[in-house]
Image (spheres, rainbow, N blue to C red):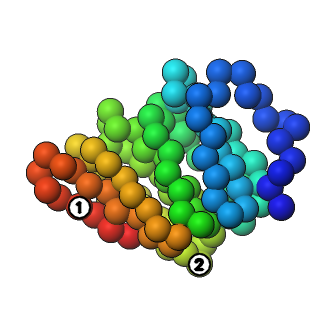
Amino acid sequence: CGGACGDVDFAGVTDVYSNEYAFAALNKDTGKVQCWGDSRFGGNCSDLDLDGVTEVYSTSWLFMALNKNTGKAQCWGWSRADSSCSDLDFAGVTDVYSTGEDFVALNKNTGKAQCW
C-alpha cells in the first residue's frame, strides 16, 4: 500500500511519520513535507501548503502538520474520519496527542485543549 518511496527525496529529512497506509517525511530545517503511500489515507499531500511546518502528527488514517510558530495547521487523510482541522485555532499549542482515530491539541500554559 505505502511502501514505494522511490520518488521521495530524503536529503535533509529529519523525521518520518506514518499511519497505517501512508508516510510523511519532514525536513524541520526547511519546513518541507513529502508524502507517499495510499493517497486515500494521506499519501498525497502535494495540493497542501505545508511550508513552515514544525511538527507532524498522525492517527491510524490521518496526518496533522502544525507550524507552532504561527499556529497554522492542516489535516489530511481518510475523508470519513473527520480530517478537517481548519476551524481550530492552534496558537500557543504546546503538545498534540493522538489515538487511532482522534487528536487532542493542548496548551499547557493556559490549560486549554481542543479535540477532534
Label 1 packing within 10 angstroms: few (<14), some (14-19), many (20+) = some
Foreground tag (2 vs 1): 1
Which labelled disc corresponds to residue 113?
1
Amino acid of disc 2: Arg
Residue drawn at x 68%, y 63% is 20
Residue placed most toward the observer, 1 or 31: 1
Instruction: List x then y, in percent, for residue 8.
Output: 79, 35
Instruction: Identify the image quadrant of residue 70.
Output: top left
Task: Give the mark, 2 or 1, whose residue is nearer the N terminus.
Answer: 2
| Residue 80 appears in view | yes
Q: Say above or below: 23 vs 39.
A: above
Q: Secondary structure at mark 1?
A: strand
Relative placement, left or right, of 16 versus 83 is right
- Closest to the observer: 13 or 7? 13
Asked if marks 2 and 1 touch (Cβ < 8 Å), the reply is no
Q: State whether residue 44 appears in this view.
A: no
Q: What kind of element bears circle 2?
A: loop
Residue underneath mark 2: 80
The residue that appears at 11% across and 51% down in the rendered structure is 110
